């Protein structure tokens, strides 16, 4: 059994996954657009929107899709947590994810972490960046 987060986007899934690929590493493992499934009913102009995408980072995966504006809801009540062991890498990734987004808690040293911070990226996805102190 595996547990994968699934993210929904307001028409920007492909851009978001490309941004995550360039920012955190990993790879887009699958990108299926609405046009790839001819029998799937879709709104006009949605051929190039994402029906399903899978993002792979090491052994972890998450998926995503574009949904119509009336189906889209701003994400809340969860965050994608990225755990790192290198503070410089945490700094770089936090800075990139925060570009055109909003910072809820600046990346900083805490009693448990070399770096810890919270933000919502430009695509509306909440993130926690955690770089624990070494024992």
Image: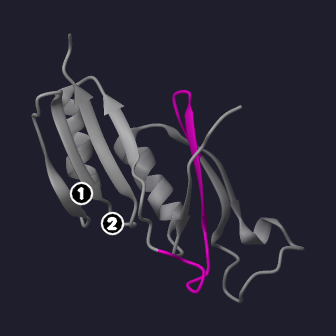
Q: Which mark is residue 116?
A: none
Residue 99 at x, y percent in the picture = 23, 60
Q: Which residue occupies 24% across, 30% down? A: 131
Instruction: Give the residue furthest to the top.
Output: 135
Please give the residue where the numbered disc 1 appears in the rendered image: 98
Circle 1 packing at 10 Å, graded few (<14), some (14-19), many (20+), is some
| Quadrant placement of the N terminus | top right
Q: Which residue occupies 26% across, 56% down? A: 119
Q: Which residue occupies 56% across, 48% down? A: 5
Is 112 drawn above or below residue 127 in the view shown?
A: above
| Quadrant placement of the C terminus | top left
Q: Which residues are magenta?
A: 55-73
- Whether the magenta-drawn stretch holds residue 68 is answered as yes
* First along the sequence among labels 1 and 2: 1
Q: Residue 56's quadrant in the figure?
A: top right
Please give the residue where the numbered disc 2 appears in the rendered image: 122
Residue 7 at x, y percent in the picture = 54, 59
**Left or right, residue 121 beside residue 28:** left
Judging from the image, what secondary structure is the residue with disc 2 in? loop
């Amino acid at each position: 059994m595996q547990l994968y987060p699934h993210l929904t986007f307001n028409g920007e899934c492909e851009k978001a996954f490309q941004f995550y690929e360039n920012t955190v590493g990993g790879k887009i493992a699958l990108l299926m657009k609405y046009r790839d499934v001819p029998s799937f009913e879709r709104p006009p102009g949605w051929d190039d929107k994402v029906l399903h995408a899978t993002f792979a980072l090491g052994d972890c995966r998450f998926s995503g899709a574009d949904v119509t504006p009336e189906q889209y809801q701003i994400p809340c009540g969860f965050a994608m947590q990225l755990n790192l062991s290198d503070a410089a890498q945490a700094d770089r990734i936090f800075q990139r994810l925060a570009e055109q987004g909003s910072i809820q808690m600046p990346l900083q040293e805490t009693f448990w972490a070399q770096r810890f911070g919270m933000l919502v990226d430009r695509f509306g996805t909440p993130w926690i960046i955690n770089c624990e102190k070494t024992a």
